[in-house]
Image: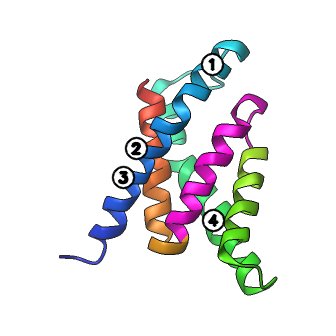
Amino acid sequence: MLPIIEPIKVGILIGMVSYAVTVPLVIVQVRFAGHYSLFTSRAKQFLLEVVVGPTIEELIFRYALITFFVAHLGLSSIISILLSAVLFGLAHRWYMMIPATITGALYGYCFIYYGIIAAVIAHMTHNFFASVW
């Protein structure tokens, strides 16, 4: 089996789990807050939400931050994952902070144990299901 297959499988699985775990929180909060889109084209919105956004966010919040916390500050993997997850949650809209923190922790787990590709795929999978919902 190709070495890339394992991170992809794990990424898809964690993405589906993160969506299933956080969707009840998102439904309640989005209905309360009134979800809106800044984009006029559904194709552009899909591309940004499912491909571009997750890739950039994972490179920043998982690859850069967790690596910095572990390598330069000497923090443990668990503390680094939690710090990165909290910062990830804070970077989202107020009604998405709790679900984003939860998913950020799951993506951090993916990054530490399976690599950045698994984290990106997990995030893309989550956002794919969220965008077609």
User: Earlier along the polypeptide chain: callout 3 or callout 1?
Assistant: 3
The residue carrying mark 4 is 62
Q: Amino acid at mark 3?
A: Ile
Residue 66 screen position, x and y as percent: 68, 71
> Magenta part mainly helix, strand or loop?
helix
- The residues colored magenta run 92-111
Instruction: Check disc 1: other Cα within 10 Å, few if <14, some if 14-19, many if 20+.
Output: few
Instruction: Check disc 3: other Cα within 10 Å, few if <14, some if 14-19, many if 20+.
Output: many
Residue 119 screen position, x and y as percent: 50, 61
Q: Amino acid at mark 4?
A: Arg
The span from disc 1 to disc 2 (Cα, nearest Å) is 19 Å
The residue carrying mark 1 is 28
The residue carrying mark 2 is 16
Q: Is residue 47 visible?
A: no
Q: SS for tag 2?
A: helix
* Left or right of 46 on screen, residue 73: right
The span from disc 3 to disc 1 (Cα, nearest Å) is 25 Å
Q: Amino acid at mark 1?
A: Val
In the picture, residue 129 is in which quadrant? top left
The span from disc 4 to disc 2 (Cα, nearest Å) is 19 Å
Q: Residue at x 45, y 36 (%)?
A: 20
Does the stretch in magenta take in 39? no
